[in-house]
Image (spheres, rainbow, N blue to C red):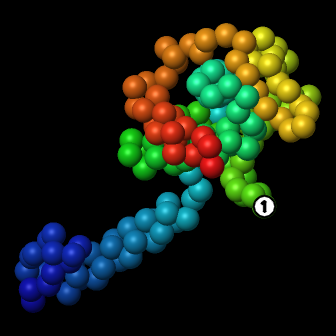
Amino acid sequence: MVRRFFNGYLDRILTNKTVYALLHVRSLMIHERNVIMDEKITYRLNYRKAIEAIVWLSFEKPTIDIYHIAKVLYYAEKLHINKYAKPIIGDTYIRMTYGQVPSGVRDLITGNAWLDPGYLKILSNSVTIHKKPYVNLSASRKPDLNCFSDTDIACLKWSLDKYGDV
């Protein structure tokens, strides 16, 4: 009997025993594919790039607030993942009432005590954080762009131009 398997990739004359064996293998492959698709994709935050991204944003747009930093980073990461299949800083984004928030960047800016003190010191030496009337930042130094690729910078610029003033 002539059968077509794997969506047209395999045409053969098969006996009944081979048909059963191939159907079993195909069902295992489909099951394996479904299990893989259900897993959540996670990235590890690169603190050095996150700090430099904060410095770059506060250098490009002085007195940028924490909300605009979150928005710009979210859309830059989204664009970069969609175009190049990898994140810029690899942060975890948390859905909150007024939009997505990069968890690690928020923790750096607010100075959570559980973070490595070295990262908090680097950030405090790099940007000035003003807490009144709301949290905004201004750069104390120029950003080190050597840790970013050209595509990282292009996505960050695009996102800052589009969402930096919204």
Q: Position of residue 30 (x, y in %)?
A: 40, 72
Secondary structure beneath label 1: loop
Task: Tell me which corner region of the image, top left, top right, bottom left or bottom right, holds residue 121.
Answer: top right
Q: Position of residue 155 (x, y in %)?
A: 46, 37
- On the rendered structure, is 166 left or right of 162? right
Residue positioned 20% across, 87% down in the render = 16
Of residue 143 and residue 78, the one placed in the foreground of this image is 143
Quarter of the picture holding the N terminus: bottom left
Q: Is 79 in front, or is 16?
A: 79
Figure check: 124 above or below 14: above
Rendered position, 107 above or below 143:
below
The residue at the point 73 percent across, 44 percent down is 67
Q: Which residue is mark 1?
A: 97
Where residue 148 sits in the image (x, y, percent)? 49, 23
User: Mark 1: which amino acid?
Assistant: Thr
Residue 123 in the figure: left or right of residue 48: right
The correct choice, above or below, for 138 with respect to 96 in the image is above
Residue positioned 38% across, 68% down in the render = 29
* Residue 112 in sight from this viewpoint: no
The number of numbered discs placed on residues in the rendered structure image is 1
Residue 114 is drawn in which quadrant?
top right
Indicate left or right for 130 with 55 as reference.
right
Q: Residue at x 67, y 10 (%)?
A: 141
Relative depth, front residue between 160 and 91: 160
Q: x%, y% of residue 36?
A: 50, 60
